Image (cartoon, rainbow, N blue to C red):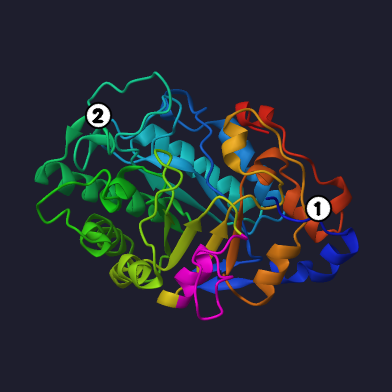
Amino acid sequence: MSETSMSDASTAAGKDVLFRPFTLKSLTLKNRIVMAPMTRGMAEGGIPGEAQTAYYRRRAEADVGLILSEGTVIDRPASRNLPGIPFFHGDKALSGWKAVIDAVHGAGGAMGPQIWHTGSTRAGEWEPEAPVESPSGLLDPKTPRGVTMSEADIAATIAAYAKAAADAKRLGFDVVEIHGAHGYLIDQFFWEGTNSRTDGWGGPTIKDRSRFAVEVVKAVRAAVGPDFPVIIRLSQWKQQDYSARLANTPAEMADWLQPIVDAGADILHCSQRRFWEPEFAAEDGENGLNFAGWAKKLTGVPTISVGSVGLSGDFFGAFAGQGSEKAGLDRLIERMARDEFDLIAVGRAILNDPQWAAKIRADKTDSLKDFDPKSLAELV
C-alpha cells in the first residue's frame, strides 16, 4: 500500500510545517527535512573525494535542513561489508570529510556523519581481510559467520565509536549519528536472534541486550561533551529478517529506548519501511502513531521518522531494481502538523533528485521525479 497522492495546491497549503526551524543544543536547522543516510559505496580506498563533496554540497544548496552521511566505518577490523564504504578514521579519510563539511557549511547546510560497524552482515561476495565480528558469531539465528567478540573486542569497539564521534566534532560537523539499526553490529546486540550471550552483554530481555548500545552512547557523549547533539538510528526490522521485532508492546519499547536516552542520546532516528504505518495496534486510541511517534511519546526526546517519503514503493524494491512513482505528502504534512515526530528523513527521493526539498518549498511539485533505480549506481 503506497502513500496516497495529493494535489499541488494541497501540498502548497501545508508544506510550511516542513520548513519550520528546529533547534536542539548547539544545532539549529532551517527546516525539518533531513537527507537520510544511504549507502553509496563509491569512496575509492575508503577515502571521500571531490565526487562525495559535490554530492553532499548539492543537497545543502537545495534547502535540505540536515544532511546525514552514508554509513562511515569506525576504526575496527572488518567494520564494513563493501569495499567502497568510506572510513571515518585515518588522516586521509578525515581530511576528505573535512572538505565535505566545509563545502556543506559553505552552501548554508548542516551535516553529521553516520558512524557504523556492519557486524557480521554481508552485502555481496566481497570479504574483508579480517574475520567479521558480532555478539555471538552469527549472521542470523541459523547462520554462523565470523567470530564472537571478546570483552577486549567490545571495549575497543566502544572506544572506536567514541573516537569517531570526537573526530566529527573536531572537524566541524554539526551532529553525529550512531547506526544502531538494520541488523548491523549494535542491532545484532539488540536482537535475540543474533545475541545468545550469557554474560553481561546478552540476556533474555531487550533491556538486557541494550547494554552495548548504552555503553556506546555513554562513550560518545563523554567524547563530544554535553552540548553536541547525538543521534542514534534504530529499527525493528533487520536486513536478515524484515519481519523481526525488538519490541512488541509500548512497555517493551520503553525498556529498549529509555536506557539509550538516559545514556545521552538526544534524537532517536526511527527507521521503518513506510513511515505512515502504525507501530502497534494500541487500544488507547493512538494506534495511528508510527515508530517515531511512539518513541517520542515514550521518551520525550525529539525523533526523526523515515520510510518511503514521497514515493509509492519502499526501498526493498529499489534493491531489486524496481522504480517508484512520486507520491503526495498529505500523510507527512498531517503528522508533522500534529508534531507526532520532529524531523523527517527523505532517502531515495533526495538521492534521485538533489532539488527535492527546494522544489517542495517553491511549490514545484509537478517537477518532482519518479525514482529511477539507476541513480543508486551514481552520485547524482
- Residue drawn at the location 27% of the way across and 60% of the way down: 206
Mark 2 lies on residue: 145
371, 73: nearer the viewer? 371
Badge 2 amino acid: Arg
Quarter occupied by residue 10:
bottom right
Q: Secondary structure at mark 2?
A: loop
The spot of residue 40 in percent (x, y) is 53, 33
Q: Nearer the viewer, mark 2 or mark 1?
A: 2
Q: Pointer 1: residues within 10 angstroms few (<14), some, or many (20+)?
A: some
The C terminus: image quadrant: top right
Percent across and percent down for residue 313 are 67, 43
Q: Earlier in the sequence, mark 2 or mark 1?
A: 2
Question: Which region is colored magenta?
Answer: 276-297
Q: Amino acid at mark 1?
A: Lys
Question: Which residue is under mark 1?
Answer: 359
Q: Secondary structure at mark 1?
A: helix
Residue nearest the observer in this picture, 380 or 305: 305
Residue 305 shown left or right of residue 108 in the figure: left
Q: Is residue 171 left or right of residue 285?
A: left
Q: Which mark is residue 309?
A: none
Residue at 62% in and 34% down: 318
Majority SS type along the magenta span: loop
Q: Is residue 302 visible?
A: no
In percent of width and height, residue 212 lies at 23, 55
Percent position (x, y) of residue 349? 69, 45
